[in-house]
Amino acid sequence: MDTKPAATALGALAHENRLTAYRLLVKQGPDGLSAGMLAEQLGIVPSSLTFHLQQLLHAGLITQRRVGRQLFYAADFTAMNSLVAFLTENCCGGSTVCAPVCQPSATAIQESPDKTAARQRRG
């Protein structure tokens, strides 16, 4: 991946609703979700969701397919992996010594930053 597509993808993810939608689609897997189910699960009105999904489509982060009258959206895992590879390709100057530092821990994957902060406030 080159710098311009990476910047476009990161720009598309730089909005709370789009990031939340994208993370939900990643969690859902290759089958994705219908636009109606996405709107329902995210609590976003369909017209607003359409705008956000178009930004993710334009950035190449998600795919769209029509099944009958419904539109289904899914994360494009190849694009996601390309973006992550672009972000980490020069990790620690290419040294293999720090390579594990660039990989998310199992705890970080399972627990969102909001949950971590809430847990830390509770003590």
Image (cartoon, helix red, strand yellow):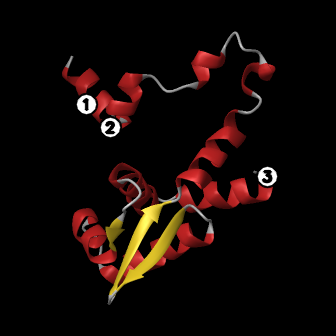
- Judged from the image, the secondary structure of the residue bearing numbered disc 2 is helix
Residue type at the position of mark 2:
Asp
* Residue type marked 1: Ala
Q: Is residue 91 above or below residue 46?
A: above
Res. 46 mark: none
Q: Is residue 50 above or below residue 38?
A: below
Residue that appears at 33% across and 75% down: 35
Q: Which residue is mark 3?
A: 3
As displayed, is residue 123 above or below residue 111? above
Q: Residue drawn 22% across and 70% down? A: 40
Report if the CB atoms under discs 1 and 2 are less than 8 Å apart. Answer: yes
Is residue 24 placed above or below 48 in the rendered structure?
above
Residue 79 rendering spot, x and y as whole percentages: 61, 54
Label 3 Cα crowd, 10 Å radius (few <14 / some 14-19 / many 20+): few
Viewer-closest of 84 and 116: 84
Question: Residue, x 70% and y 9% (percent of image)?
Answer: 97
Image location of residue 6, percent across then percent down: 70, 53
Residue furthest out toward the bottom: 69
* Residue drawn where x is 75% and y is 51% of the image: 1
In the rendered structure, the answer to whether residue 108 lies left or right of residue 13 reads left
Sequence-first tag of 2 and 3:
3
Nearer to us: label 2 or label 3: 3
Res 117 → quadrant: top left
